[in-house]
Amino acid sequence: MRGPRKTKDRRKLLGRSGLTYAQAVDIQLRLAEQIVTSPPARALSRHHSRSWRGGVPARRDISLVAGADVGYDKARGVAVGGMVLFSWPGLEVVDVAAAVAPLDFPYVPGLLSFREIPALELAYCRLAGRPDVIFCDGQGIAHPRRCGLASHLGVILAVATIGCAKSVLVGEYDEPGPARGEYSPMRHDGHVVGAALRTRDGVKPLYVSPGHMMDVETALELVLAAGSAYRLPEPTRAAHSLVARIKRRL
DNA sequence: GCGACAG
DNA sequence: ATCTTGTCGC
């Protein structure tokens, strides 16, 4: 017997999660119905409450943001979740939190959230403050069932989220222009589910999609305002390095 | 049946 | 994601 055995049995339990593929899919379908597609406190901000401080757009409805990421320790069979809290729009680190959780769910395309959310939820609870928006490493609604990691996390935590993926899961798009800020919509099933955004000149685009309490335009605006030195927004980048740091200490 | 497939 | 140093390019 050789080659990667597929998880074709939708009735077979996935890892030690106690969930079958079919059950996980049902959960996503229910979560997707709870996704709010408009940004938080929209009436208070929007075009008029915007001001500029240090070149970063400020919004009255956002004073704290967070970056989230997860890393794995295959040997120990655990997932390390990390969250970094930032002031907004100043982008100063306010707090960091990490958590280790058992890795009981396998990596299955389309079901990533079940594998990473346990560690993220725990790290979130350990955070000193409550972010108004969380930048996640993965898809939001740019997902087969409109329930990627960012959407799933946003709904269960009741927090606005944005999916910042390094590669595509689903959706078609035209290559955006080469300059930072240029983007092109990603479509799936006849819907715009996100956008391929050039966060740095001449670099591979970042795939941005709304998670929860978010829309594409606001997501793009916030991602661009959350960093310009690297392809990934600062919050997500900080969370990634935090996780890497924690993993070494194990 | 043949590819594609977040992290 | 993870295994891993140096190296080619702007």
Image: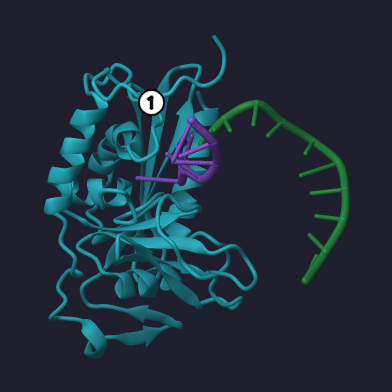
Chain colours: A cyan, B purple, C green
Question: Could you say where residue A64 lies in the image, as x and y percent from the top left?
Answer: 29, 63
Residue pictured at 18% horizontal, 69% vertical: A38
Question: Where is A108 relative to A146, above or below?
Answer: above
Left or right: A202 as drawn, with respect to A207: right
Decide if residue A111 is on the left or right side of residue A130: right
Q: Position of residue C10 (x, y in %)?
A: 78, 71
According to the picture, the residue beneath numbered tag 1 turns out to be A106
Residue A97: quadrant of the picture: top left
Packing grade of label 1 (10 A; few <14, some 14-19, many >=20) is: some
Tell me where residue A62 sits by quadrant: bottom left
Q: Percent position (x, y) of residue A213? A: 19, 63
Whether A128 is drawn above or below A171: the answer is above
The residue sitting at the top extreme is A1
Q: Nearer the viewer, residue A83 or A202?
A: A202
Q: Give the image location of residue A77, x and y in percent.
A: 43, 19
Locate the N terminus of chain A by quadrant. top right
Identified by mark 1, the residue type is: Pro
The structure residue drawn at horizontal position 50% and vertical position 52%, both measured from the top left corner, is: A167
Tally the marks. 1
